[in-house]
Amino acid sequence: MNAQAKQSDRIIPLREYAERRQRLIEQMAPDSIAILSAAPERTRSRDTEFPYRQDSDFHYLTGFDEPHAVLALIPGREHGESVLFCRERDPDRELWDGSMIGPDGAVSDYGMDDAFPVGDIDDILPGLIEGRSRVYYSIGRDAGFDARVMEWINSIRSKVRSGAKPPGEFVSLEHTLHDMRLYKSGAELKAMGRAATISAEAHCRAMRRAQPGLREYQLEAELLYHFRDQGAAFPAYPTIVGSGANGCVLHYIENSGVLADGELVLIDAGCEYQGYAADITRTFPANGRFSAEQKAVYEVVLAAQKAAIEAVKPENHWNQPHEAAVEILSQGLLDLGLLKGTLEEVVEQGHYRDFFMHRTGHWLGMDVHDVGDYKIGGAWRVQEPGMVMTIEPGLYISPHNTQVEERWRGIAVRIEDDIVVTRDGYRNLTTGVPKEIADIEALMADG
């Protein structure tokens, strides 16, 4: 498949990548340069590599998904402000690894102003850096590339007596670029909506398949099959399928346990579609029917999630959904007899953290834990249209917690949806998978 054909399949149009680069350039100092490197290929074992996944910042600005590439953004450059260094086309290499874009394709198919073979970067890029007073660059993300950047800078410094002008300042690129990424465009929301739909369908598939005696990895297989079948190349993060007490392990990914009659199953899974992540958690009974204790805990978490989602709206601050969830979870723990005291004591002294030890959500986008500041100037950030977050309260009652009655031990419930801040409130991208108790039991009965 040629590059133009690949572009035609994408939700994000070519012009949007160019617009992003231009917006970033407009926020840079006029005598500066920004340098970004593509993600390196990573060895899995000996001579095999992990499936390649482009660096999110690099993809955000280019849509270019090959390794061994470097982007330079140079405000005011006469011959074009966006310059890409990439691999040259090589028929012999393409026979083994598939087609390459090449410098010509980077210009014609990816909208770059200029492009050069990456093998020539040591000869060309120092000349583009020279005379620029400021370099926007993300130091510390790739030690090998950091060293190359410093070699280029030092090569300019070595020629100062000949009139060369090395840059005098390095500025972190993340602050400006990550703030841009925080606000999703219409096309980005469309891609995220597709990721959410595929992921919701996969969760429904797993619920229908579930029954006592299955292995957790068999449900994982249902999820991964549906992701790939619907065009999502990867899961957005390692899939969690935790049955029984395994659900109390927040990042459980072994997925080798057996679903037992009378236990809950917690699935936290989402696909990545065209570079954008979904993130959904649902909890359901392995046998299709909630016990009285499971139902009681589940209803507390569901009420907390609904209250947190209602706190998503413009002008509310980032922490308000968490505050709403904590209050309801804390009252629920008191009502169930799992904690003692007053609501004020439980919240202020943090006693609820014995059962709810994480935040209620995080930014979502190209990365499942996406970029963007949560506080500005020490204050919680205000929610604004185009931001996307997860809302995922939970309660986890350790099987080893001797402070509670045995009937509660080993119950773990988390419910998570992907929420867009809109002009008048919010939009839930992940309504395609049920979370009401009656709806879950009906879906599993139909399975």
Image: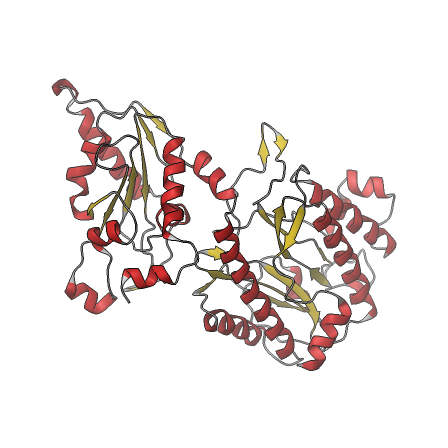
Where is residue 337 shown, x and y percent of the image? 86, 55
Where is residue 372 shown, x and y percent of the image? 52, 40
- Residue 11 vertical position relative to residue 135 in the rendered view, above or below: below
- Residue 218 vertical position relative to residue 54 in the rendered view, above or below: below
Where is residue 53 shown, x and y percent of the image? 38, 57
- The picture quadrant where one finds residue 1 is bottom left
Q: In this view, does 410 lie to the left or right of 362?
A: right
Q: Nearer the viewer, residue 341 or 429?
A: 429
- The picture quadrant where one finds residue 432 is bottom right
Q: Which residue shows up at 40% across the image and 53% down it?
A: 13
- Residue 15 vertical position relative to residue 178 in the rendered view, above or below: below
Any part of residue 141 in sight:
no
Q: Is residue 223 left or right of residue 207?
A: left
Quadrant including the C terminus: bottom right
Where is residue 414 shown, x and y percent of the image? 68, 59
Q: Nearer the viewer, residue 297 or 303?
A: 303
